Image (cartoon, helix red, strand yellow):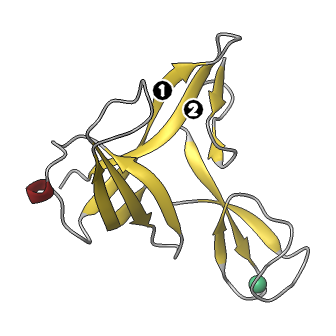
Amino acid sequence: MQRPIVPFIKLPEGGGTPYLVGSRCKACGQVYVGTRRSCPRCYETGQMQEIRLSDRGELYLWTIVHQSAPGINVPYVAGIVDLPEGVSLRANVEGIEPKPENLRFGMPLELFFEVVRQDREGNEIVAYKFRPAAA
Ligand SMILES: [Zn+2]
């Protein structure tokens, strides 16, 4: 059994491609990460529509993490990724050496999913990450 590490990862039944879930307000158009019942921007309720967020984005901010909790491999790249829907996600960026010369603001990234660990019941915990987008 696979389980998402955060509630806004959707793991389709039957092994379909995972994706990130967002909500779009039908009243004002604002998009949020995850499922919401009401819109914090315009206060409408009952207008939220569940959407599939893009699997491509741009690197907005990044930092190279050299110290972390035990069991977490360092260094790694922690980033903020902007999606075309106007939402930002905190995500690790992989697929490149974690060196400043390999990173630039605005670089195109693509989403991928990976099993990062097992929980006590033996479920595979699935996380989302980004890597440089294929040209
Ligand atoms: Zn709204």
Q: Do the residues labelled 1 and 2 touch (CB within 8 Å)?
A: no
Mark 1 surroundings within 10 Å by alpha-carbon count, few (fewer than 14), some (14 through 19), many (20 or more): few
Q: In the rendered image, which residue does mark 2 sit on?
A: 16
Foreground residue, 8 or 79? 79
State which quadrant residue 36 falls in: bottom right
Circle 2: residue type:
Gly
Q: Which residue lies furthest to the right in this view?
A: 46
Left or right of residue 99: residue 130? right
Position of 58 relative to 128 (above/below): below
Position of 100 relative to 16 (above/below): below
Q: What residue do we see at 52% from left, 73% from top?
A: 85
Ligand 1 quarter of the rendering: bottom right
Q: What residue do we see at 31% from left, 61% from top?
A: 62
Q: Is mark 1 within 8 Å of ligand 1?
A: no
Q: Residue 108: horizontal and vertical position, in percent?
A: 27, 63
Q: Residue 131: horizontal and vertical position, in percent?
A: 29, 47
Mark 2 surroundings within 10 Å by alpha-carbon count, few (fewer than 14), some (14 through 19), many (20 or more): few
Element on which disc 1 rests: strand
Count of numbered badges drawn on the protein? 2
Q: Residue 73: horizontal and vertical position, in percent?
A: 33, 30
Q: In the rendered image, which residue does mark 1 sit on?
A: 116
State which quadrant residue 32 falls in: bottom right
For the C terminus, give its image quadrant: bottom left
Element on which disc 2 rests: loop
Q: Residue 69: horizontal and vertical position, in percent?
A: 45, 34
Viewer can see residue 17: no
